[in-house]
Image (cartoon, rainbow, N blue to C red):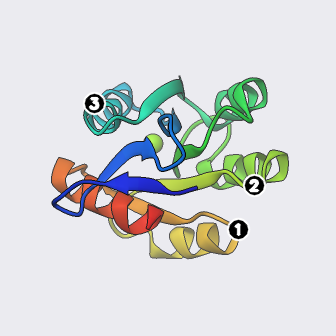
Amino acid sequence: MSILFDENGLPTGRKKEGGNLKVMIVDDSQFIIKHLSQIFLSRDFDVVGTADNGKAGVELFKKLSPNIDLVTLDITMPEMSGIEALQAIKALNPNVTAIMVTAIGTAESVKECIKLGAKGYIVKPLDREKVIERIGQILK
Ligand SMILES: [Mg+2]
């Protein structure tokens, strides 16, 4: 999966082969969902689905996959954690790009997620510029 970068080296959601990257956001904070959605949409990613816990996220992924290229997963959520959701989602489609969203100071969980197939992580509180840069590094 390769995307186009703009003249400043920042990622766009446009794929080299045409079309936009399709994103699903899973987070128990509506504020984070809204903020992340705005960031993705501002860069031409398509946000095709959101869920507010891991279990709902896996169910939605079952429905929407293979129409999802990228999933962001909050680590701490009710019903099912982001770590468990990551495992379930990767089992359904090993090719999906998973990015964890985590509060500062959860290095151990992040390491575990990388081992389980997550491609990288975004740190909360979300800073728009940093999130965009980070997504670029992860998708490069
Ligand atoms: Mg949370």
The 10 Å Cα crowd at callout 2, few under 14, some 14 to 19, many 20 or more, is some
Q: What's the residue type where badge 1 is placed?
A: Leu
Q: Earlier in the sequence, mark 2 or mark 3?
A: 3
| Distance CA(mark 1)–CA(mark 3) | 28 Å
Query: Residue 106, located in which quarter of the rendered image?
Result: bottom left
Badge 2 is on which residue?
Answer: 87
Quadrant of the image for the C terminus? bottom left
Disc 1, SS: loop
Whole-percent x, y for residue 57 in the image: 65, 32
Whole-percent x, y for residue 59 in the image: 75, 27
- Disc 2 and disc 1 in contact, CB within 8 angstroms: yes
Give left or right: position of 57 versus 72. right
- Residue 11 image label: none
Determine the residue located farthest toward the right in the rendered image: 91
Q: Is mark 2 within 8 Å of ligand 1?
A: no
Question: Residue drawn at (40%, 42%), measured in percent from left and top?
Answer: 13
Q: Earlier in the sequence, mark 1 or mark 3?
A: 3
Query: Residue 78, located in which quarter of the rendered image?
Result: top right
Question: Residue drawn at (29%, 39%), measured in percent from left and top?
Answer: 43
Which is in the foreground here, disc 2 or disc 3? 3
| Distance CA(mark 2)–CA(mark 1) | 7 Å
Q: What's the residue type where badge 3 is placed?
A: Gln
Whole-percent x, y for residue 89 in the image: 74, 46
Give left or right: position of 123 versus 27. left
Total numbered labels: 3
Q: Is mark 1 within 8 Å of ligand 1?
A: no
- Residue 116 image label: 1
- Residue 38 image label: 3
Q: Earlier in the sequence, mark 2 or mark 1?
A: 2
Disc 3, SS: helix
